[in-house]
Image: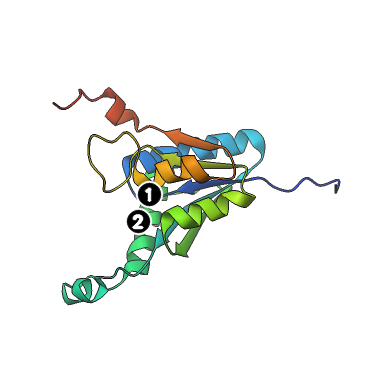
Amino acid sequence: MSSEAAIQRIIVGVDGSNASIEALRHAERLAVEHGAVVEATACWEYSNLYDAYAALGIDRPKDEARQVLAEAITKAFGPVTPENVNPVLVRGDARSLLIESSKSAAMLVLGNRGHGGFMGLRLGSVTAACVAHAHCPVLVVHNKDEMLAPSQA
């Protein structure tokens, strides 16, 4: 092994949800403690309904994902992004890409719920798939605001 240890990577799935923003904050704190870098990862792909979206004026999934990622980083850290946080934008299915990325990561950090799904589920489908299939430890971070809010009947 080399005298210089490889820099550890902590991958965070970012979808713009409050839970993913909290996951990003938590991952950055862990990265500082362990000398790691954070890859704030947003995934995008063209939907099977792309033509319908284009007709509605929604024709730039990559640009929208880039904007969601930039806004999430700003919400998490303010106007100055920490030096150990790198935005990563990748094309493809979030489940598959995050699980594949976990092969070379020290940790995968995800929010407990992202966009979509049913309110009654405790984990989003991407998070649940990553917990079940990732190749590294997975930390699921809960959104503090959701935890403090009274439960909905």
Q: Which residue sits at x=45%, y=48%?
A: 13
Q: Nearer the viewer, residue 87 or 136?
A: 136
Q: Which mark is residue 147?
A: none
Residue 84 image position (x, y, % from top left):
58, 47
The crowding category of the residue bearing disc 1, from other C-alpha atoms within 10 Å (few below 14, some 14 to 19, many at least 20), is: many
Q: Residue flagged by tag 1: what amino acid is it? A: Ala
Residue 104 image position (x, y, % from top left):
64, 51
Q: Which residue is mark 2?
A: 68
Residue 74, compared with residue 34, is above or below; it is: below
- SS under mark 2: helix
Q: Nearer the viewer, residue 26 or 125?
A: 125
Q: Which residue sits at x=41%, y=41%?
A: 128
Q: CA distance from mark 1 to mark 2?
A: 6 Å
Q: Residue flagged by tag 2: what amino acid is it? A: Val
Q: Where, by quadrant of the figure, is residue 125 drawn?
A: top left
Residue 106 image position (x, y, % from top left):
62, 42
Q: Which mark is residue 72?
A: 1
Residue 35, compared with residue 61, is above or below; it is: above
Figure coloring = rainbow
Quadrant including the C terminus: top left
- Left or right: 100 as drawn, with respect to 118: right
Q: Are marks 1 and 2 in contact (CB under 8 Å)?
A: yes
- SS under mark 1: helix
Residue at far left of view? 153
Q: Where, by quadrant of the figure, is residue 17 drawn?
A: top left
Residue 98, compared with residue 57, is above or below; it is: above
Q: Where, by quadrant of the figure, is residue 114 drawn?
A: top left
Residue 119 image position (x, y, % from top left):
22, 37
- Left or right: 113 as drawn, with respect to 34: left
The crowding category of the residue bearing disc 2, from other C-alpha atoms within 10 Å (few below 14, some 14 to 19, many at least 20), is: some
- Numbered-mark total: 2
Q: Which residue sits at x=61%, y=50%?
A: 103
